[in-house]
Amino acid sequence: MKNSRFDTIRSLKTSNVKSKLDLSNIKSTDINILLNKVRLDQKNDFRKKIIYFSLIISAFLLTGIITFI
């Protein structure tokens, strides 16, 4: 039993040391890259909205033309 307790305590200590080391190696990112990604996402969303809106309008126009003919 003594060996298992000792091994458990040792593993806990090494895991704490590893987590402290991981926190010290935090990488930073460039804010411009993130802003460019957001702008591209906004542009793509706007294009999708225009496409959906134009499809809905064309469907209404098509049904209107069919009903009047």
Image (cartoon, grey):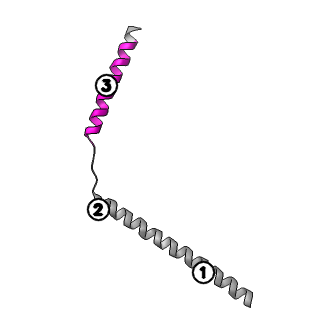
Question: Which residue is painted at 69% across and 88% down in the image?
Answer: 65
| Circle number at residue 14 | 3
Sequence order check, earlier mark of 1 and 3: 3
Horizontal and vertical percent for residue 7? 36, 16
As shown in the figure, which amino acid type bears the numbered disc 2? Asn
Toward which corner of the image does residue 32 lie, by quadrant? bottom left
Where disc 3 sits, the SS reads: helix
- Indicate whether residue 57 is drawn in magenta: no
Main SS of residues in magenta: helix
Magenta stretch in the rendered image: 4-26
Q: Which residue is mark 1?
A: 57
* Position of residue 67 measured from the top left corner of the image (x, y, whole percent): 74, 86
Q: Amino acid at mark 1?
A: Ile
Residue under numbered circle 2: 32
Locate residue 62, reporting x and y percent.
66, 84
Relative to residue 45, is residue 11 depicted above or below?
above
Say whether disc 2 or disc 3 marks the residue closer to the N-terminus: 3
Q: Secondary structure at mark 2?
A: helix
